[in-house]
Amino acid sequence: MSSNLFIPKTCKHCGNAFTARTTVTKYCGDTCAKRAYKARKRKEKIQATLTEDMQQ
């Protein structure tokens, strides 16, 4: 079911303005969503190694 909403938003990753069709949209497109996911996973991996080093 398509939405009749057009919500102006700003992309959480690149900062560009875009028009969202749903209220939960965070990123302007698939590429920004993938890049944000990769950055989030990279940050989690770094955090895991830092906490592991602190325990030793």
Image: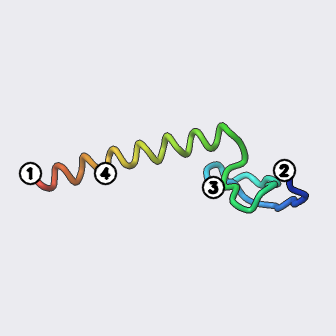
The answer for how far apart the CA atoms under marks 2 and 1 are is 53 Å
The answer for how far apart the CA atoms under marks 3 and 1 are is 36 Å
The disc placed on residue 47 is 4
Give the mark nearer the N terminus: 2 vs 1.
2
13 vs 38: above or below: below
For badge 3, the amino acid type reads Lys
The disc placed on residue 56 is 1
The answer for how far apart the CA atoms under marks 2 and 3 are is 25 Å
Give the mark nearer the N terminus: 1 vs 4.
4
The answer for how far apart the CA atoms under marks 4 and 2 are is 40 Å
* Disc 2 to disc 1: CB gap under 8 Å: no
The answer for how far apart the CA atoms under marks 3 and 4 are is 21 Å
For badge 4, the amino acid type reads Gln
Q: Residue at x 77, y 57 (%)?
A: 22
For badge 2, the amino acid type reads Met
- Between circles 2 and 1, the one closer to the viewer is 2
Tell me where residue 35 appears, x and y as whole percent.
57, 40
Q: Which residue is mark 2?
A: 1
Tell me where residue 37 appears, x and y as whole percent.
52, 44
